[in-house]
Amino acid sequence: QSALTQPASVSGSPGQSITISCTGTSSDVGGYNYVSWFQQHPGKAPELMIYDVSNRPSGVSNRFSGSKSGNTASLTISGLLAEDEADYYCNSYAPSSTWVFGGGTKLTVL
Amino acid sequence: QLQLQESGPGLVKPSETLSLTCTVSGGSVSSNSYYWVWIRQPPGKGLEWIGNIYYSGSTYYNPSLKSRVTISLDTSKNQFSLKLSSVTAADTAVYYCARRRGGSSDLDSWGQGTLVTVSS
């Protein structure tokens, strides 16, 4: 079970849009619509931002959106705010009823 | 509102067994709608899924940890627990308990996490 591949870091200026990718295989990301995204600020527990590829939990800003194409899922944040600066992790269902996380991406708001 | 709280020793000696408990309030571990999950994060590193348990007692574990992990449910106390045997320094991490809705990747509720250090 290998970790999903995410870029180590991305950056953007306030007001801009950024996209974070999460690449797996046909056995995990590509095989199921069970991909979620989490935001984690330093010293805090992760917070769910997107589940089942593109669904937003109640209370999460509509500036956050998710999508998937083939074996790659993506998280897009539009209208970047300073408070969006955090680490982001993807998570996918994997074979044998297991789950796998991505390595994480550090978002810097310039 | 659902709350989850991890508890257990913050320091464990190498080769011993790490034991943590997650106490659930505002919801029931006996619900057939959810899975109860353990996740960990070594200092400065990413998240790692450890495993989960269903109300029926069915368990699923990370293949890389499977030989050392046991997750169990105590419905009378509304808790679920993690045991990790033969620990080494590599098992030093913040351990989180969480809830996932069945049939979904909706991991909507997390505990605050507890740091467990493996050291003699």
Image (cartoon, coloured by chain):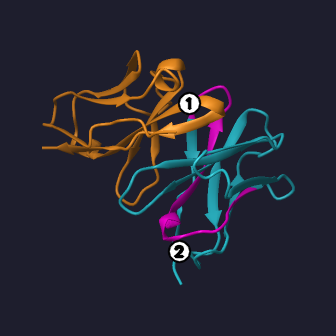
Chain colours: A orange, B cyan
Q: In the rendered image, which quarter is residue B82 located in?
A: bottom right
The residue that mark 1 highlights is A93
Magenta segment, which residues? B80-106
Q: Which residue was labeled with disc 2?
A: B118
Residue type, mark 1 in image: Tyr
Vertical side of B71 occupied by B114: above or below: below
Three-letter amino acid code of the residue under disc 2: Val
Q: Chain of mark 1?
A: A
In the rendered structure, the residue with mark 2 lies on which chain?
B
- Indicate whether residue B1 is drawn in magenta: no
Residue B38 in percent (x, y) is at 61, 51
- Horizontal and vertical percent for residue B25? 71, 53
Q: Secondary structure at mark 2?
A: strand
Q: Nearer the viewer, residue A61 or B80?
A: B80
For the residues marked 2 and 1, what is the alpha-carbon distance in whole angstroms?
A: 30 Å
Identify whether A21 is placed above or below B8.
above
